[in-house]
Image: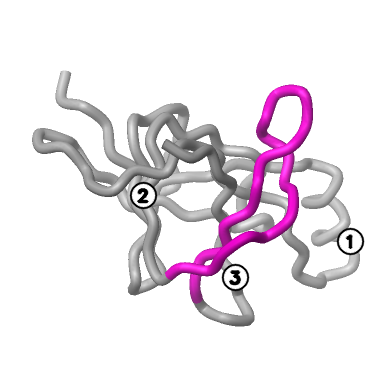
Amino acid sequence: MTRAIVYKNLRRGDWSIATPTGREGTGRGKVTDHRASVILQNPVFIVQESGRQRVLRVKQREVHAWVCGDIVDALPAGLVAREITYNPYRCGSFTARDGAPIGTCDFVEFTESGVAIAYAREA
C-alpha cells in the first residue's frame, strides 16, 4: 500500500495525488499523479484552517483540504456508503451531503464522476 494525499483538482476535473509530508504524515507534498478515480483505506480528513480563512477572506480557491490514506485497488464487500463533500463557505470540515460531519470511516472512494464516497464497515 502506498500512502498518499488526495484532493479534487478543480481546474482539471480529476483527483490530484500528492506525497504526504510532515511529522504526522498528513501534510501535502509534491503532486505525483492525477487520476480519474482512486480508493484510500484508513483515511484522515485534513482541513488547514489558516488556508480556509484565507479562502473566505479573498474569495479565491486554494488547496487547503484533502484526505490522507493508503491507496488500495478495490473495496471489500459489506460496507455502508455515504457521499461526502467539502465546502469552505459552509463548514470547516468534510461533511456528508446531508450536512452531518464526517468523523472517521474505513475507506474513501474518489470516483470518475467527481464524487467522493466514505465507506464504513457494518456494525
| Dot in front, 2 or 3 | 2
Please rate how many residues cluster around mark 3, counting C-alpha atoms within 10 Å: few if below 14, some from 14 to 19, many from 20: some
Q: What residue is shown at x 34% (from left), y 71% (from top)?
A: 112
Q: Residue furthest bottom?
A: 12
* Disc assigned to residue 57: 1
**Left or right for 58, reference 103:** right
Q: Earlier in the sequence, mark 2 or mark 1?
A: 2
- Dot 2 and dot 1 residues touching (CB under 8 Å): no
The answer to which quarter of the image holds residue 115 is: bottom left
- Dot 2 and dot 3 residues touching (CB under 8 Å): no
The answer to which quarter of the image holds residue 8 is: bottom right
**Residue annotated with mark 2:** 39
- Dot 1 and dot 3 residues touching (CB under 8 Å): no
Per the model, the C-alpha gap separating discs 2 and 1 is 33 Å
**Kind of residue indicated by mark 1:** Arg
Q: Chief secondary structure of the magenta span? A: strand
Q: What residue is shown at x 41% (from left), y 36% (from top)?
A: 1
Q: What residue is shown at x 73% (from left), y 59% (from top)?
A: 63
**Residue annotated with mark 3:** 9
The answer to which quarter of the image holds residue 123 is: top left
Tell me, yes or no, whether the highlighted magenta stretch contains residue 20: yes
